Amino acid sequence: MRHLRLGAAVLCGLSLAAPAVAQDVAPQSRAPLGEAIRKALIATPEVLSEVTRPAPEPIDLYAEDAASDLRTLDRAASRLFDPEQPGIGPDGAPTRIAIFTRADCGTCGSAMADLRALAERLGFRATVFDIEEDAGLARDLGLDVAPSYVMRDRMLRGDMPAIVLERYLTD
């Protein structure tokens, strides 16, 4: 127990000491001090257990919500990515994204133009839904903002710059 207190006292003293104080230790005192610290740590390795133990796994606060979203997307995938749904992009190209718009949406026109340009350039198809006409599907997905984008593994609510959409679509 004496070693534990000694080790803790030495470590505590060192952690509280300012760098200037450590530099003021006479060179002939440094070696004995270092040896005393070494012996104390060897005798009581538990003193360092807080510092040397592995960090705990981080908690993912959104894991349950993300898993729920993915289950919802799986259930709706056949309708969301159905090539028979109205859409934009090259005929026969794989459907990779769905967009939900609204007639009175101020940003939906530019969102559609950006998505159309991306679809043509990257060779994919996007299905187009009206958030009011397809209210049941939008509600099931938890979408209440237009435009909103739905991919097989994520939902993006609100207008996204084309560069952001391209990044998601090319990952």
Image: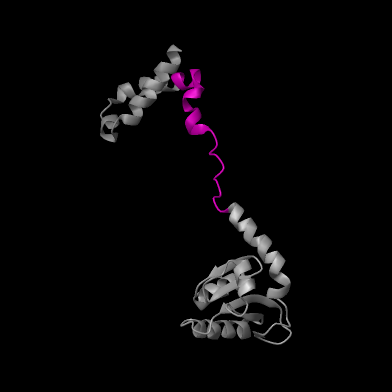
Q: Is residue 91 left or right of residue 162?
A: right
Q: Looking at the image, which residue is at 68% across and 87% down?
A: 90
| Residue 57 falls inside the magenta stretch | yes
Classify the position of the C terminus by image quarter: bottom right
Please say if 164 is above or below 102: above
Percent from the top left, x then y, of residue 2? Answer: 43, 12
Q: Looking at the image, which residue is at 44% across and 15% down?
A: 3
Q: Looking at the image, which residue is at 60% across and 72% down?
A: 138
Which sits in the foreground, 141 or 32? 141
Which sits in the foreground, 169 or 38? 169
Tell me if residue 98 can be seen: yes
Tell me if residue 170 can be seen: no
Q: Is residue 138 left or right of residue 38?
A: right
Please say if 76 is above or below 103: above
Q: Looking at the image, which residue is at 64% across and 65% down?
A: 153
Quarter location, residue 30: top left
Tell me the magenta residue range.
Answer: 39-62
Q: Is residue 119 left or right of residue 14?
A: right
